[in-house]
């Protein structure tokens, strides 16, 4: 079946260091979309990045990710972590099968940025 | 941007009672979802809903759970009867899916925190 793996449950970084949150996936969908959602405490999860194009870098709010279908990966990166980046980050996969738009979320990675 | 509204934001009830969580999705969206997040844990899929029908549900969607969207009004999650393990934050989400490929973004509400005593 379809699955998304985020191996790190918690990543703690010092402000200013680069961020890399790992995401790998398995899917039967030939045209799957991959997403990163960010969830700040007491807010609703919101979209950070999305992509369905192989080997194309997508960027938003200082974060970037490149979908690599050959390695089934969509890692989230940022050159320099800020305290305000502390949040829960979900990698997600979506696709359509027999008319059902299905979303599969990873377990989430909590990013904690310290001064 | 588009907003998904959830009512109530917080509800405390006694075990065994019924609860209905309401979701007002983005107006032109077609697909609706409920997710459950127990404190400190990941968000987990419960159910999705399209054209008046449940499309898919997870193992967490127990027989005591039901969803509906009567006459295009609120998309509701009803739990009857509630159990202690139902205590969680429930997130509603909606998306506009197109027939040919989809941009697929989910829009989430801020969650309804349910406390079962």
Image (cartoon, coloured by chain):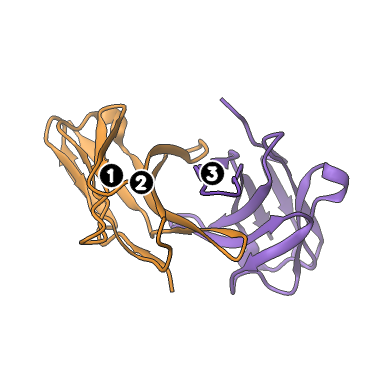
Please tell me the colour of chain B.
purple
Horizontal and vertical percent position of residue B102:
52, 46
Circle 3 packing at 10 Å, graded few (<14), some (14-19), many (20+), is many
> On residue B106, which mark appears?
3
Residue shown at the point (54%, 44%) measured from the top left: B106
Circle 2 packing at 10 Å, graded few (<14), some (14-19), many (20+), is many
**Mark 3 element type:** loop
Could you give the CA–CA distance between mark 1 and mark 2, rounded to whole angstroms?
7 Å
Q: Which chain is disc 1 placed on? A: A
Q: Left or right: B69 with respect to A4?
A: right
Question: Disc 1, disc 2: CB below 8 Å?
Answer: yes
**Mark 2 element type:** strand
Residue shown at the point (71%, 55%) measured from the top left: B50
Q: Which chain is disc 2 placed on? A: A
Report if residue A40 is visible in the image: no
Task: Tell me which label, 1 or 2, sits earlier in the chain.
Answer: 2
Residue where numbered disc 2 is placed: A89
Q: Left or right: B22 with respect to A99?
A: right
Q: Could you confirm whether marks 1 and 2 are on the same chain? A: yes
Q: Could you confirm whether marks 1 and 3 are on the same chain? A: no
Residue where numbered disc 1 is placed: A111
Could you give the CA–CA distance between mark 1 and mark 3, rounded to whole angstroms?
22 Å
Q: The orange chain is which one?
A: A
Q: Residue furthest right?
A: B71
Could you give the CA–CA distance between mark 3 and mark 2, rounded to whole angstroms?
15 Å
Please state which of residues B33 and B104 is positioned toward the viewer in this rendering. B104
Report if residue A30 is visible in the image: yes
């Amino acid at each position: 079946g379809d699955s998304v793996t985020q191996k790190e449950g918690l990543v703690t970084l010092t402000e200013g260091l680069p961020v890399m949150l790992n995401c790998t996936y398995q899917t039967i969908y030939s045209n799957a979309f991959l997403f990163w959602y960010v969830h700040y405490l007491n807010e609703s999860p919101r979209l950070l990045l999305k992509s369905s194009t192989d080997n194309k870098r997508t960027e938003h709010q200082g974060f970037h990710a490149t979908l690599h279908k050959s390695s089934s990966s969509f890692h989230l990166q940022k050159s320099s972590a800020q305290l305000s980046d502390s949040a829960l980050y979900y990698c997600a996969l979506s696709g359509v099968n027999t008319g059902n738009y299905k979303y599969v979320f990873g377990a989430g990675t909590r990013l904690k940025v310290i001064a | 941007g588009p907003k998904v509204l959830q009512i109530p934001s917080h509800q405390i009830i006694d075990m065994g009672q019924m609860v209905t969580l309401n979701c007002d999705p983005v107006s032109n969206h077609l697909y609706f979802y409920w997710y459950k997040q127990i404190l400190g844990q990941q968000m987990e899929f419960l159910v999705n809903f399209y054209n008046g029908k449940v499309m898919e549900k997870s193992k967490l969607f127990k027989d005591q759970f039901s969803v509906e969207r009567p006459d295009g009004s609120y998309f509701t999650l009803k739990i009857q009867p509630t159990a202690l393990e139902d205590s969680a934050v429930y997130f509603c989400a909606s998306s506009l899916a197109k027939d040919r490929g989809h941009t697929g973004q989910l829009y989430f509400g801020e969650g309804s925190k349910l406390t079962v005593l």
